[in-house]
Structures are given as C-alpha cells and as structure tokens.
Image: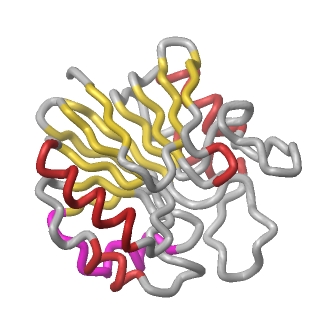
C-alpha cells in the first residue's frame, strides 16, 4: 500500500496544494494533526484538502480537538484518537494531542503521560501507529535542545512494534527518520512524505 503522510499543515495553502496533487498517486493519506492554528481555521483546512484523491486517516493535533476535527467537513476522512481502524488489511491506531502537556496555554489540546498511556493501552496490534507527538528521544528536540517527546508513545511503540510510527508536533525535527526496534519513526512535517506498508 502506498501512503502519503503529513503533519502540521497549519493552514499552509502551498503545502495543501502539493498534498492534494500528490494524493492522486496514493492509496491512503495520513494526517498526523495540527491542520489549523490555535483551534481556529479548521474549516479552511478542510476546504484546502477537499480535492484529496484518496481516503484520509487523521488524528487531532494540539491545535484542534478530536471533536472539532470530527465536526469539520473533511471529505472521506476517518478520525482516530485512542482508537483504531483497518484499511485494505492494514491496521492503524491513532492518538492525537500534545503529550506530555505543552506550555502553550489553554487553547492547546494536551494529554498527560498517564492519560496517553491509558489510551494507548487499547492498542494490542497495529501496522501503523499515528501519534501527533513523537516518542521520547526520536525526532523530539526543540530549537533549544530540549527533548519533549512522549514516554507513553515510546513505551507503546516498543510494545506494539508497528511497521511505522508517524508523528509531527516538534517543528524543529520535521523530516526526522529513525528506527525503534522494527519500527520506522518519522516526524513528518507538512511536506509530502511517501511510505510503503504491507498488511
């Protein structure tokens, strides 16, 4: 299966246009959160991505809630947040929000490590784990040199060993690729990213 994945669109019309154009070659599109900015503009983001040529599976970032993402009119999109779906034999589990809590204030949708751990416990197996937040130690270092990834996401990835862990959130590490056991970890960013996954 050919997968187009991105994160942190943040209402970038140029990146949205590239994603829509590339989607003609994809079997599935994955959006790893932060479609808008500070809980505003989600309908604009949906309009920017209205031309996607493949189904999308998305998780909310810290910039939009799960309820807001589900209510927005994204076409042919499945929203995951602490739950799973299957697409053409490939099992996907998604967890949105900032983990651990961010310093960004009341607008930010965040989870504590304990909350994230509880939600990730529902996942026994996945081919693809989608998390807005990166795992601790993998694509999670800020411009100030501080690792801000999630220990809960790290532990879940080590336990589940999906083929892919797709994340975003930490802008300074967009484009990061690494391996965690059998899992390829990618901090995506808003560019077009391609992956191949077999059930």
Q: Residue at x 26, y 69 (%)?
A: 49
Q: In front here: 21 or 197?
A: 21
The image shows residue 157, relative to residue 112, as above or below, that is above
**Residue 95 rendering spot, x and y as whole percentages:** 49, 51
Q: Residue at x 17, y 30 (%)?
A: 1
Residue lying furthest top in this view? 181
Q: Is residue 178 left or right of residue 126?
A: right
Q: Residue at x 15, y 68 (%)?
A: 51
What is the magenta range? 64-76
Q: Is residue 49 left or right of residue 156?
A: left
The image shows residue 180, relative to residue 75, as above or below, that is above
Q: Is residue 57 left or right of residue 53?
A: right
Q: In front here: 85 or 54?
A: 54
Q: Residue at x 87, y 43 (%)?
A: 145
**Residue 58 rendering spot, x and y as whole percentages:** 35, 57
Q: Is residue 2 left or right of residue 95?
A: left
The part of the image, by quadrant, that contains residue 117 is top right
Residue 9 on the magenta segment: no
**Residue 75 rendering spot, x and y as whole percentages:** 17, 70
């Amino acid at each position: 299966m050919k997968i187009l994945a991105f994160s942190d669109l943040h209402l970038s019309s140029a990146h949205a246009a590239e994603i829509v154009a590339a989607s003609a070659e994809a079997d599935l599109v994955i959006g790893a959160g932060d479609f808008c900015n500070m809980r505003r503009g989600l309908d604009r983001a949906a309009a920017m991505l209205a031309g996607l040529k493949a189904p999308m599976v998305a998780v909310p970032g810290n910039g939009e809630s799960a309820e807001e993402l589900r209510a927005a009119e994204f076409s042919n999109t499945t929203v995951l947040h602490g739950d799973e779906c299957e697409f053409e034999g490939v099992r996907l589990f998604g967890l949105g929000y900032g983990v651990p809590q961010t310093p960004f204030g009341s607008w930010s949708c965040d989870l504590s490590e304990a909350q994230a751990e509880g939600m990730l416990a529902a996942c026994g197996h996945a081919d693809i784990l989608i998390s807005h937040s990166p795992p601790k130690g993998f694509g999670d270092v800020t411009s100030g040199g501080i690792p801000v990834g999630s220990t809960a996401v790290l532990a879940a990835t080590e336990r589940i060993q999906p083929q892919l862990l797709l994340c975003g959130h930490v802008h300074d590490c967009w484009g990061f690729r690494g391996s965690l056991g059998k899992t390829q970890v990618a901090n995506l960013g808003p560019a077009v990213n391609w992956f191949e996954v077999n059930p």
